[in-house]
Amino acid sequence: MKDFKKYFTINALPEDVFNALTNPLIITMWSGEPNVMSAEPGSEFEWFDGSICGKNLRFEQHKLIEQQWYFGEDDEKPSIVTIKLHINKESTSLELRHTNIPDEAYENIVEGWESDIISPLRDLLEE
């Protein structure tokens, strides 16, 4: 199991980034795929038509998103995604920490964060 941590800057306010990661209509806009999402702790989610799925653990409005991502049957050490949003002048510093990523999925997950999530978010929010 591996961990990934990185900071990204998005030229938008934290509330806009938060909404883009929690509102199913906005997620569909940047992902181009069907999704299921709710900002309710304990709710299940699916992004990219079920390619990414898990459980929403915790939210702090415009500041924090914490999720458990499912990777098959290995629930002994859950894969946890923690996104913290910090205001940085007129932009947002997105602090991403993704823990307990299965070794065989690590490269795809890291690449996916960059190309499939952060880049489309920037494209949508920085227009």
Image (tube, rainbow, N blue to C red):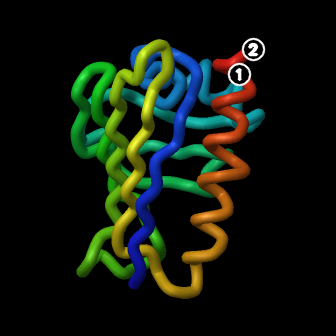
Q: Residue at x 68, y 19 (%)?
A: 126
Q: Residue at x 58, y 86 (%)?
A: 104
- Number of callouts in the render? 2
Q: Position of residue 8 (x, y in %)?
A: 52, 42
Q: Position of residue 12 (x, y in %)?
A: 54, 17
In the picture, the disc for residue 29 is: none
Mark 1: amino acid: Leu
Residue with the mark numbered 1: 124
Q: Residue at x 39, y 45 (%)?
A: 95
The C terminus lies in which quarter of the figure?
Answer: top right
106 over 96 or under it: above or below = below
Residue with the mark numbered 2: 127
Mark 2: amino acid: Glu
Q: Position of residue 121 (x, y in %)?
A: 64, 31
21 displayed left or right of 55: right
47 over 31 or under it: above or below = below
